[in-house]
Amino acid sequence: MSSVALKGYVNEYLPKIQEALKKVLNEVKLRYRIVEELYNHVEEFIFRGGKRLRPISLVAAYYSVGGSEVDDLYRVATCVELLHNASLIHDDIIDRDTIRRGGPTFHVKYAMIFRDRYGARDYNHMGLSFGIIGGDLLIALGMYAITSSKFRDDQKARALESYMRAFKCIVEGECLDITYPYVHDVSEEDYYRMVDLKTGALFVESLTIGAILGDATERQITALRRYGTYAARAFQIHDDVLGIFGEEEEVGKPIGSDIREGRKNLLIIKALELFDERERAKLLKALGNPQLTKEDVLEIRDLMKERGVLDYALGKEREYVGKAIESLTLADPPLRSREVEFFKELARYFIERRK
Amino acid sequence: MSSVALKGYVNEYLPKIQEALKKVLNEVKLRYRIVEELYNHVEEFIFRGGKRLRPISLVAAYYSVGGSEVDDLYRVATCVELLHNASLIHDDIIDRDTIRRGGPTFHVKYAMIFRDRYGARDYNHMGLSFGIIGGDLLIALGMYAITSSKFRDDQKARALESYMRAFKCIVEGECLDITYPYVHDVSEEDYYRMVDLKTGALFVESLTIGAILGDATERQITALRRYGTYAARAFQIHDDVLGIFGEEEEVGKPIGSDIREGRKNLLIIKALELFDERERAKLLKALGNPQLTKEDVLEIRDLMKERGVLDYALGKEREYVGKAIESLTLADPPLRSREVEFFKELARYFIERRK
């Protein structure tokens, strides 16, 4: 991150978020044999890494609408990080991922425990089972972060409504994302719908919760929500670009995995439109083929460059960053300038990052 | 159900619960291609059956503390049924169950869709994935049932806190339940802890939510919660008894499955204590052995009768029904008599039922 306001914000608020996360997890932990260990693994998973940009954005939204310093802000801010981690744990099962933040995914870690400590024959199934309940536990803990705070009841009720909406949307988005590989006619519109649900909603509701706690006006909330939707689209498109054009060592997973898995990302949808008949046939054959070689991927990548697919995606991500930043001006009364700078730089960072 | 108050209650309130469930599901449904189908399958699953005793008990708790007739009571009451169904869907994956309420379990149904409609090679994994997100969706919808109601914000915030607590406890209880087969020293105390979490908490919080909405006093809430804990223990012990001594056709699953799966139910824990050395060795060998024959199970069953294990469990379930009913008198002001009758008959029904 090269931006001053963004860096300043992260440096100031990240430690407070981390501290609040530790506090929440510590006080909610059931200290009872086997269950305590589940909490410990969940905690280890959360503290492996993560940029905490959602809770930090929640905090920024709060201050942007004139909220005053209160301790419990950071407590509530952890709710979106906890929900995010819940969805990572469940998604890693669904995507059959084995590595997350430099360690085994949650379900793989538990599979190893049941293999090594208990000698379980069905250790993979036990790992999967603990992945389900580990994710479930984090969903409940995110609710706890809100209910255990000292904000007013009307704010808590509204924050919990936002939380519910974010969670519901994540699930709906995941449903689309995992089904699209089996469906032929996925349009760009379908793609944005999926992105708004799977990636956008949690970011949008993070901003909304911050705004609610800061007693924002409706027009401030609308501005922040619109910002969140557009910024998340830019973020996701950039993710799609990195997944195909990024450096393998930086991105941390094999280039072209979206193609191998048959995912309908923006580049793939656009390529199916812009490729000629022979090229489209090649791409269709590659989609969902786990045996695809690196050479095949590089060939498709070159075609995407030649046919303007990459430029289209890069244009779109810039367009959405512009729309996001413009949306901030809709707020009435205007958002505080320090946070406006933060949000601008955050959106730009979303499309400048290389991993 | 042979009891007059219980029957009267169910006849009066079951249709209102069913109607509220339909309404909530209908208004929350995202009408967007693939996602809409997910909602439809979730709805079909919920309406296959189920006695709705949790939402009906929530309603009874509300009226027991003097709550007055309001439409949104039934809306909120659906939250515990939705959460219960979420946990069924996730548990069925974990327990590898294939049949639920006379149809395929949720994840098995989706596996068949991906096999038959999409010809997916990994249809079992897709089924499992949809089981995870189907359960997740229902957790969110249970929250929606509360947030979308017209109760006061303080009531909604407290109801959501109860919901969170119930959910957290279910997960903790499931964690114990699935790990106990791998642990040798599971005591009767460990068993009750597991039951209170996995079965008790949702019933207790159902009663609590009803009481909160009815503006109960603290002593009314305490009485209802204690009733709920004891009644749920009686319910679960009776479930354990039915699982080993019930009629296969009535219970709907093979007798002795708890033994085959190595589950630590009350009868098994007590048998390990009361059996002599040779008998205990036989039981330990049987636990977790999926190849166990019906004859083996019948032999263990006879031993349980001879050694007083069955009588112990039957005594315990009666004891907890007594404690549950006694707890109701702690309420101050006293609970309304119609609901006291309902709760008494419900607890008795828990241990008289044959399936």
Image (spheres, coloured by chain):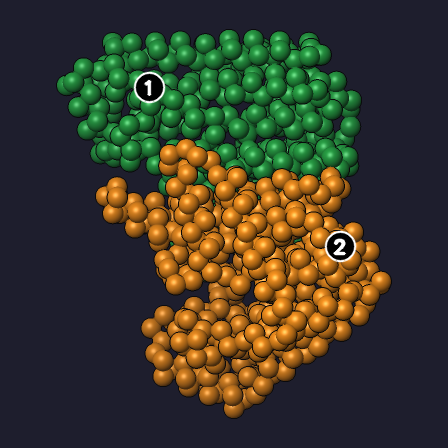
Chain colours: A green, B orange
Q: CA distance from mark 2 to mark 1?
A: 57 Å
**Which residue is nearer to you in this view: B354 or B8?**
B8
**Position of residue A319 measured from the top left corner of the image (x, y, whole percent):** 45, 9
* Residue B248 in which image quadrant: bottom left
Residue identified by numbered label 2:
B67
**Which residue is nearer to you in this view: A96 or B15?**
B15
- For the N terminus of chain A, the quadrant is top right
- Which chain is disc 1 placed on? A
- Which chain is disc 2 placed on? B
**Position of residue A252 measured from the top left corner of the image (x, y, whole percent):** 40, 27
**SS class of the residue under badge 2?**
loop
- For the C terminus of chain A, the quadrant is top left
Instruction: State whether residue A37 appears in this view.
Output: no
* Residue B326 in which image quadrant: bottom right
**Position of residue B172 measured from the top left corner of the image (x, y, whole percent):** 58, 55
Residue identified by numbered label 1:
A267
Q: Nearer the viewer, mark 2 or mark 1?
A: 2
Q: Residue at x 41, y 37 (%)?
A: B35
**Position of residue A268 measured from the top left corner of the image (x, y, whole percent):** 30, 22
Q: Amino acid at mark 1?
A: Leu
B232 relative to B43, above or below: below
Q: Amino acid at mark 2?
A: Gly
CB atoms of marks 2 and 1 within 8 Å: no
Q: Residue at x 75, y 54 (%)?
A: B67
Is residue A241 shown left or right of residue A14? Answer: left
